[in-house]
Image (cartoon, grey):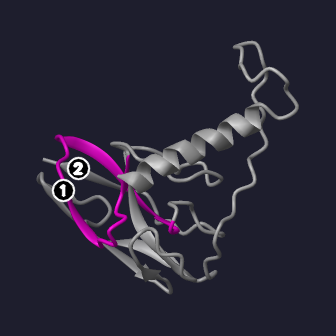
Amino acid sequence: MIIKNYLLVLASLFMLAACNQNNENPQISVAEEVPTSAPMIKRNKAPENADVYFISPTANAMVTSPVEVKFGVKNMEIVPSGQNSPLTGHHHIIINANLPNMNFPIPANENYVHFGDGSTETVLNLSQGEHTLQLILGDYLHVPHSPPVYSEQITITVK
């Protein structure tokens, strides 16, 4: 929880710094143009051959809720968040949303679920209907690697 709050504050500071560059008035008005350049954020290296994928469910699977989800990874090691070791990271699952901005820590909400404890599986309570799922690895501060390591987006149907 402390790390999550720290990351939200850090992301807010990055956004404020980007918006207030060369601006004596720190207030942002609706009429101001929002900068399109990304803040300078350090992204840890990932090997070019790193891969993250779903072991289960598979694409186009018909499932019942709760849905058991298992994650796989190749050429990187999964460790809990907060551990800054080379070629390591932890899983995040994206539910019914797109990939996040790679220049910021991965959001934490109902669409972007963090597994900072190093988990490689979970159970999701999903409503009936179609849902998209995608995995992305984050480093010790929940920042995507360089290059980012993410799975294909899959669609599942909950009966």
What residue is rendered at 52% in x and 62% in y? 141
Is 153 situated left or right of 110 in this image?
A: right
- Looking at the image, is 128 positioned above or below residue 72? above
**What residue is drawn where x is 49% and y is 83%?**
76
Q: Position of residue 66 (x, y in %)?
A: 12, 54
> Which residue shows up at 64% across the image and 41% down it?
13
Spot occupied by residue 54 in the image (x, y as percentages of width and height): 34, 70
Q: Position of residue 104 (x, y in %)?
A: 61, 51
Disc 1 target residue: 62
Report the residue that reaches farthest toward the bottom: 75
- Mark 2 Cα shell of 10 Å, populated few (<14), some (14-19), many (≥20): some
Q: Secondary structure at mark 2?
A: strand
Number of marks in picture: 2
Q: Is residue 99 magenta?
A: no
Q: Which residue is mark 2?
A: 157
Q: Position of residue 82 (x, y in %)?
A: 46, 69
Q: Which residues are magenta?
A: 112-140
Q: Amino acid at mark 2?
A: Thr
Three-letter code, disc 1? Met
From where the camera sits, is residue 32 visible? yes
Q: Is residue 107 visible?
A: no
Tag 1 secondary structure: strand
Q: Quadrant of residue 52?
A: bottom left
Q: As rendered, which of 103 and 70 lies closer to the eye?
A: 103
Height in image: 135 above or below 98?
A: below
Q: Is residue 51 left or right of residue 53?
A: right
Viewer-proximal residue among 18 and 100: 18
Q: Rate crowding at label 1 as few (under 14), some (14 to 19) or many (20 or more) other CA atoms within 10 Å.
A: some
* Dot 2 and dot 1 residues touching (CB under 8 Å): yes
Identify whether 118 is placed above or below 25.
Answer: below
